[in-house]
Each structure stands twice: as C-alpha cells, then as structure tokens.
Amino acid sequence: MPVSDFVQHVAQGDVHVLRLNNPPVNTLRNELRAGLLAGVNAAKAAGAKAVVLIGTGRMFCAGAEMTEFGKPRQPPSLTDVFDAIEGYPGIVVAAIHGSALGGGLELALACHARVAVADAQVGLPEVKRGFVPGAGGTQRLPRMIGPEAAAKIIVSGDPIKASEANRLGFVDAIIDGDLEAGAVAWAKANIGKTFTLARNRTDRISGQDPAAFDAVVAGLLKRTRGQESPKGCAEAARASFTLPFEEGLKKERELFQSLVSGEQSKALRHIFFGEREVLRIPGMPAEAKSLPVERLVVIGGGTMGGGIAMSAANNGVPVTIVEMTDEALQKGLARCHANWERTVSSGRLSQAEYEKRRALLTGSTDFEGTVAKGDLVIEAVFENMDVKKQVFARLDKAARPGVVLASNTSTLSIDEIASATKRPELVVGMHFFSPANVMRLLENVRGAKSSWTTIATATEFGKRIGKLPVLVGNCDGFVGNRMTGKRTPQVEKLLLEGCLPQDIDKVMEGYGMAMGPLATGDLAGLDIGAAVRKARGTVAPVADAVVALGRFGQKTGKGWYMYDEKRNRLPDPEVERIILDVAEKMQVRRRKISDEEILDRLLLPMVNEGARILEEGVAYRPIDIDVVFCNGFGWPAFRGGPMFWADTQGLKTVRDKLAKYAEATGDANLKPAALIEKLAAEGGTFAGMGAKAA
Ligand code: NAI
C-alpha cells in the first residue's frame, strides 16, 4: 500500500515500514514530506505499534531539498511531520544506512529511537551551506548528547560514523546484516518500552556551565574566520540549555531565516551546486564513455608524481611510478610511504589500510615495459617543453593503442605536447595542484584535438581518485594560474605605493583567503617567481630586491617575512627598508592605501582576466572559474569565488573601478574586458550568462 510514489508503506504485522523513496538521495521535498505524514497517520489508523523509517537506494536521507529554498513552502512542513512522529501512540524508529544528513538527521532525531549500520554517516552540514539546521537539530541533539558535544557536530558540519554516534548516545543500536529486517526485529523487540523523546529530555542539558560551553565554542570558531553561519550554529546550540525547547526552536528558526537569505549562504550554495554543475560538460555527447582504467602509470616520481600516485592508491587504483634512476625512484616511493606513515601515526589511517595502499603503489625504471601495461598514463616530469615532447614521443611508441596520455603541465601547451605523438586525440592535460594527494581541484585541459572519449576518461578517472575535475581550455596558466598571475603585478605596485606585506595579507585573509599572496609566496618559494620573470624577461623591482638578498621564503627562513622557530611569520624591518629604498629610487611617493583599495586592486584584475577567459571559451561558465578558485586556490567558499563576488559588487561598479585603476596604474590588464563592458551596459551579471558550448 504505497502512500505516495515518494514513500512506500509496507505493513509487517505490528510494525509498519515507511521507505523514503526520492532517488537519488531522498531529499525531503514537499511530496516526500506529505507522504511521510500520510504514512505515519495511516500506520496509526491501522493500529501499528511501531513504525520504521528507512531510505531506499544508497542512503537514508541527504536532507532538505535546497531547490525549494526561497520559494513559498507547500505544507506539510517538516515540523508537521515531526509532530505526527512525536505524537505517535507507539514508537517510530529511524533505520539509517548510507547517510543521514541535515534535515535527514533531524528527522531521525525526532523519532523515538535510531538504529544504523556501523559505517553510516550522520551529521548536520547546514553550516557549510551558510545556515543553521532549521528543523530542531540544534535543540534535540544537545538534549541527547550534551551541548558541548553537539556544538562540535553542529558548528563543524562534519559528519561522523554511526558507530561513533552510538557511543555518543544518539544512535540506539548498530545493526549488522540486512538493515530493514534488523530494524523491524529491533522495533518489535522494543514495542511497549518507553523512549523519552529528545524534546522532553533535560538530563544532558541541566547543569551545563555556560562558560565551559563558550570556551569550547571559541575554540571551534577560531577556524571559521569571517564566516557567519558557525556563529549562528553556536548561538542556536547555546539556546538548547538557556531556553525552553519551544523557545529554542523559535530562536533556531530566526537564525535559519536570517542566514539563509544572506549573501554568504547564497555563495556557499552557489559553490555546492557548482561542484555538481562543473561535471556536466556542455556539448559532451551522451555516448562519450570513459575508457576502463585498471592500472595507472605515472611518469616522474617527484613532488607531483608522488602525490598523484598516492591519490590513485588511496582510492584503490593500482599505480606504478616510472623514474629515470633507481635512486630517484626509491626517493620518490619513500616520500609516499613516509607521508602515509605520518597519517598512521596521527591516527587518521589504519595500519591495514596503509599496507593496502602501499601494496597498490609500485615503481620501476623500465619505461617501455611499464608504460605498455598502463591503461592511462599521467606524465609529471620537469616543466620543460623539450623534455615533455621527448617523453610523449616515447610514450606514444610504448603505450598500447587507444591508451590516453595525460600531462600534469602547469603552463605548457597541451597541443604542442600532443604534436609529439601520433595520437593527439588521446592527449589531454590533467593539472593537479600541490600537494596532489590532498588538493581536490583537477583542471583537465582540453587540447584542440582531444576526443570526447579522452575527456570522459580524464573526468571519470579524476572523480574516481577523489578529485573534482573542471574541464578548461588550453592556454598559458589555464584558468587558475592565469587569473592569479594578473594579481601579481598589483601586489608589486601596492608594495611600492604604500603597503607592507602584512597590510596586504591582512586584507586578503580578512576577506577569508586561506593565506595572503605574500605568505603564499614565502611558502612556495620566491625563487620560483624570480625564475619565471627571468625566463619571460619581466622585472618586479621590489620582489627582485628581496630575492637578491637570498630571501627565498620559508625554505631559507626569510622571505617577505621572517619566521620564528615555530614557523610563525613576523613582519621584518629589513623588508620594510628594501621596499622604502626601491620606492625612493623609483621616485614613488608612498601614501596610505585603504583596505578597500587593496582588496579591489587584487580581486578586480582576476575578475577581468576571468571575463577574458569566458570570452575565449577557456572556461565554459562563470561557475567553472568559481569552483576552480574555491577548490584549488584557498578562496573562501562563503564568498562564492571571483565571478560571484563580481556580481555582488555589480558589474557596472566593477567596470568603473577597473577603468579607474587601469588609468591610475597604467596596467593595461586592468582595462575592462569586452564581456564586462557588455554585461555592465546591459545591466547583466555573470550568473545570468549561458554556458558557452565547446
Ligand atoms: P619534480 O622536479 O619534483 O619532479 C619531476 C620528476 O620527474 C623528477 O623526480 C625526475 O627525476 C622525473 N623525470 C624527469 N624526466 C623523466 C623521465 N624521462 N622519465 C621518468 N622520470 C622523469 O617536479 P614537480 O614539481 O613534481 O613537477 C612535475 C610537473 O608537474 C611539472 O610539469 C610541473 O609544472 C607540474 N606541476 C607542478 C606543481 C607544483 O606545485 N610543483 C603544481 C602543478 C603542476
């Protein structure tokens, strides 16, 4: 007796099962809420003593249907459903597999009891979408496990395993074997027992010391600089022990409403949906299928090759690194092993998993013999066109026909690399970011001749090894590095005109960047930028003067900053002297520069270059650019990425400011891009643009 297409109702004697059925992740859309309410009422009418809620497909429930946000809500609300559950004259048990997240977990928390498979994930990720749980999660969870433990879950938004939730006390039992059968049996065995609903419990919140709670929260908020939703989550969780239940719910609702309509939440949802959108490649024919990859071969076991190989092994893919000498090979493999061993020591990786990964990673100096066995080859040798072309000519001969050859180059032309082979249609860029075993972004670079099968293979393989692949076009620096490169001249100019490194980094970090551009330079090594300038015949008088003193950054203990023994960065008077000297020599009158000007002059050149990248079709859509920055360049997701930020400023303002700074600084790069001129004149936005098909 189905209650609706979205909820299946199966009676098993005294126990009725309601299956949430809204593939693929059972979001709580209106029809599902209505089906649940009808199902609970029907079970009640039939006299069922227990009801089991379970999800069909791969999970219990991923939460609210976010596409319904901002639209008038159709009844019933989740609260109506929860009222029916809490008023049920028997017990309602949530049976969790896969995930119970956000509204999905809140639904489970409103039940009389919860059972789960041990490795199911439970959590309240709302904070990551810029709001607070809005259906009682912040009031019920603290009543079950105490406000401090609950705040950790609510403020971080990170899910935990059901086994851990069982230990904490909000999952009543772990079920082995078939979940539905196990949950029905558990419910049967517990018919007639009294379960105190979370809303009626006070045992875990009474006597909570507000100061102890605030101290825990202060620790949690340290890592969420500039973001509003973690503060809102903490405030809501605090209400669980300072206010009665109903008033706490009201407080939670108010916080939810104000945050969900704010700019930060819009930005976070833009990135959340964007990370799914980038995988839908415009123009990709439905029949384009990825080639099967059973063994990956990585050429070069240096910084990047090692990280790429680790990503493969971390995700169960057998991988062989090819190096030129046994010494280089052993060094490369040892670095991977040491990296895993550190993770084992920190308790984040089991010994068994480590051994599994280690066995998947092998090495060889037999180039031809190894390449012949690979189903996909990723090259990560030195960044030099001649070297790359030699390697690709050799790969072309050694690899089986039909095997895709990818390059991890960060600047070189994929088309020129492909020209060294007789299979340019099978050549593609796979641009990983450092450290490659950690960073999620993967810029897949489409060559002029790359086939859809090749692109599908790079996309699917990237996903399989835990990356977020964004397809971009072939140009110097691709999307991320090309745009960041336009910021660098402004950093130099700001230093000359009046800023110190710490002034610039403070503004960028205040905006929410993981690290300011000068601190980032110190981490990466200032000699790298100097070498690029030399190769390109450009100068940067301040940066060149810093490098000339052997200040290469953290690796030499000094760069834009000096560093103490704990690697804390400290402003360095010597750097100030260098800057003042160069400015004097160049007869630049230094002035006080406002934070707003610093931010504009660093972000606007990137937006302008982003617009050119869109004009050229190097990025398909503005969202591709935003996803690149939020996943590979430390851009705070709660700001939505550079193109989203530009829209929030208004493109007319962006155009006017660019024109003003182009004039004032003589930087031709700041002349507003044609696309910005056009959109500003039309009153348009980047978000309103359609995708440019390949
Ligand atoms: P690396 O110098 O650490 O490693 C290169 C390795 O390739 C060396 O171990 C070398 O022995 C090996 N190699 C050179 N020729 C070879 C050949 N013919 N056969 C087998 N092995 C060979 O360099 P890194 O940093 O790993 O860079 C590799 C590539 O990744 C470059 O194209 C670079 O532009 C790109 N890349 C680097 C990033 C970084 O942050 N380091 C970020 C993204 C891309």
Image (tube, rainbow, N blue to C red):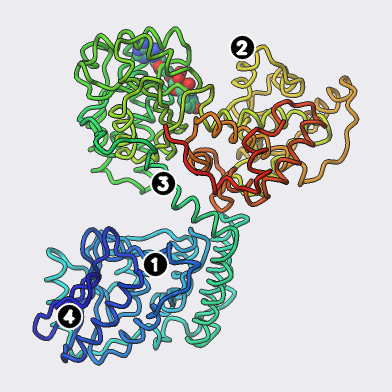
Give the percent coordinates (x, y) of residue 568: 64, 40
Q: From the viewer's perspective, tell me whether residue 202 is left or right of residue 119.
A: right
Give the percent coordinates (x, y) of residue 538: 69, 15
Q: Earlier in the sequence, mark 1 or mark 4?
A: 1
Give the number of the disc on residue 187: 4
How far apart, in angstroms, are the residues tagged by discs 1 and 3?
19 Å
Pointer 1 residue: 64
Q: In the image, is the residue at mark 3 within 8 Å of ligand 1 by its beta carbon?
A: no
Q: Spot the residue most to the front.
A: 682
Quadrant for ligand 1 reads top left
Type of residue at label 2?
Answer: Ala
Type of residue at label 3?
Answer: Glu
How far apart, in angstroms, are the residues tagged by discs 1 and 4?
26 Å
Residue at point 62% right, 47% down? Answer: 684
Give the number of the disc on residue 535: 2
Tell me the quarter of the picture where residue 609 sits: top right
Give the number of the disc on residue 92: none
Q: Are marks 1 and 3 in contact (CB under 8 Å)?
A: no
Q: Spot the residue most to the left.
A: 13
Q: Are marks 1 and 4 in contact (CB under 8 Å)?
A: no
Query: Dot 4 surroundings within 10 Å: few (below 14), some, or many (20 or more)?
Result: many
How far apart, in angstroms, are the residues tagged by discs 2 and 4?
72 Å
Type of residue at label 1?
Answer: Ala
Residue 467 vertical position relative to residue 333 in the rendered view, above or below: below
- Observer-side mark, 2 or 4, equals 2
Q: Earlier in the sequence, mark 1 or mark 3?
A: 1
Residue 327: tell me if it is visible.
Answer: no
Residue 271 vertical position relative to residue 178 in the rendered view, above or below: above
How far apart, in angstroms, are the residues tagged by discs 3 and 4?
41 Å
Give the number of the disc on residue 277: 3
